[in-house]
Image: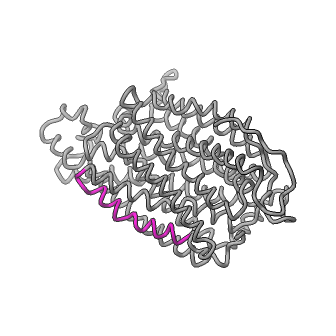
Amino acid sequence: MTATTAPKESAAPEENTGFGTKSYRTYVLSALTLIYIMNFVDRGLLAVVGPDLVPELGISDTQFGLLTGFGFALLYTIVGIPLARYADAAHRVWIMTICVALWSLMTVLCGLATEITIGSVTIGAFWVLLVCRVGVGIGEAGCTPPANSLIADYYAPRDRSQALGVYSMGVTLGTMFANLIGGWVTDAFDWRTAFYVVGLPGLLIAVVFKLTVKEPPRGFTDTKGTQSSEPVALREAIRELTTKPAFWLMTGGATVAAFCGYGISSFQSIFLVRAHEITTGEAAIWINTPVSLSSAIGTFATGWLATKLYKKHPGAIAWVPALGLALSIPFYVFAFTTQNLLFAAIGLIIGGFVKYGYIAAQYTIGQGVVSMRVRAMATAVLLFIANLIGYGFGPLFIGFISDGFFVSGAAELGVTAEALSRNQCHPSVIGELSDNLQNVCGAVYSQSLQSAMVIMATLYAASSLFFLLTWRRLDKDMVDRN
């Protein structure tokens, strides 16, 4: 991020081109996208280092699902609403600056997680790491709502979908860099060092962002005469949202997609390591990185396609992602069931490319069906539901189902949960088990997680259906068509 001269404030132009010069808008969008990339690098790193972290800390798949999901998402979603409410009236650049610094610091502290003894009380490393993850979630809650509101003021409605498509690439690019950086650092050093490496730069970026990005006049790109600096009452905002079925149908689709996506991405590295017997770094760099890159390209491509189709076919913003989500299912099922690592990678790459059109769509629809003064609130409500249910319970669901399949599978082979835990099947310690227990590990260690991943992939069908239903309501509910 380099310093750029900020434009002077001026009255909204007759021709609605957005706030500032084109080059400055590009800089601001790049800065916001970089921060969103960091957002997902920091939150996604835990899933990358999971294959090494889980056995070292001695935690179960359910506990790991809690760390990657609900432990992060609970306060992330709860804090998101008041922060978005504040962003509808306060200085959005300051909000983002403080939040970027906070989540970066808490990411660094994740690397310090270890068992702590205070007097006669011992706090396990799992609980220490959980507290740090909660801190990351609180900080990251202040990213997307104000960022979406800023983009809405910097970009005119006709350009907003494409701008949001660029911004939305932060999800997949962040995941890609989390794998590329985290995987290499974990193999070269250890998983704790990976948290330091990705967390510390955020403190500097927060300062540069504050010094170079200007707060635009609120409502700058709205139709002349409709701008208002007064925030809408919370009750009024909720009332407006309740009159928009398209918003809630879209939110349902985004929530199911998040449930599946976050669950799969949280356990993808662990699955690859268990099923194909590769290292954490190999899974992250050679599989997850190209998958994330493909997903990023797909996010932009589907956002661009929907924008081009929008002029003649406004419903494309809903049916394009619906089609992509449905198409992803067979590729994911194939990736999780094939025994060939190359074929698994190809399935994941194609599945990621076609499914992520829903990200730009959710923000475009969320911004387009409401008035200017509740944009940040609409985004916060969307993220509250999608993240609490999707992010919160998606990884936890996979972890719980995986542990359940492991226990039941071992029981069918005559081994109780007390006699064999999953972490005893880890390659570093499996040699200490008897031949019988080693055989049981071979039968259920990776297969239990595989079954959970396949079940999750099929649920994308429900998300696709929600977006198709959204398509049917868009003509009535969209208010922002310029």
**Residue 193: which quarter of the image?**
top left
Q: Position of residue 89 (x, y in %)?
A: 80, 51
Residue 333 part of the magenta-drawn span? yes
How many tags in the picture?
A: 0
Asked if residue 318 lies left or right of residue 184, the reply is: right
Quadrant for the N terminus in the image: top right
- Which residue occupies the extreme left position in the image? 435
Residue drawn at point x = 39 percent, y = 31 percent: 186
**Residue 223: which quarter of the image?**
bottom right
Q: Nearer the viewer, residue 442 or 44?
A: 44
Residue drawn at point x = 64 percent, y = 38 percent: 100
Q: Is residue 412 shown above or below 242? A: above
Q: Position of residue 235 (x, y in %)?
A: 76, 63
Q: In this orientation, does residue 286 appear?
A: yes
Q: Position of residue 362 (x, y in %)?
A: 59, 62
Residue drawn at point x = 65 percent, y = 59 percent: 381
Q: Nearer the viewer, residue 130 or 314?
A: 314
Q: Is residue 174 shown above or below 128? A: below
Asked if residue 235 lies left or right of residue 132, the reply is: right
Magenta stretch: give its range: 318-340
Q: Position of residue 456 (x, y in %)?
A: 38, 59
Quadrant for the C terminus in the image: bottom right
**Residue 261: which quarter of the image?**
bottom left
In this picture the colour scheme is: one colour
Q: Is residue 471 shown above or below 14? A: below
Q: Nearer the viewer, residue 11 or 323?
A: 11
Q: Main secondary structure of the magenta part?
A: helix
Q: In this orientation, does residue 67 appear?
A: no
Residue drawn at point x = 53 percent, y = 57 percent: 300
Asked if residue 43 lies left or right of residue 337, the reply is: right
Residue 392 part of the magenta-drawn span? no
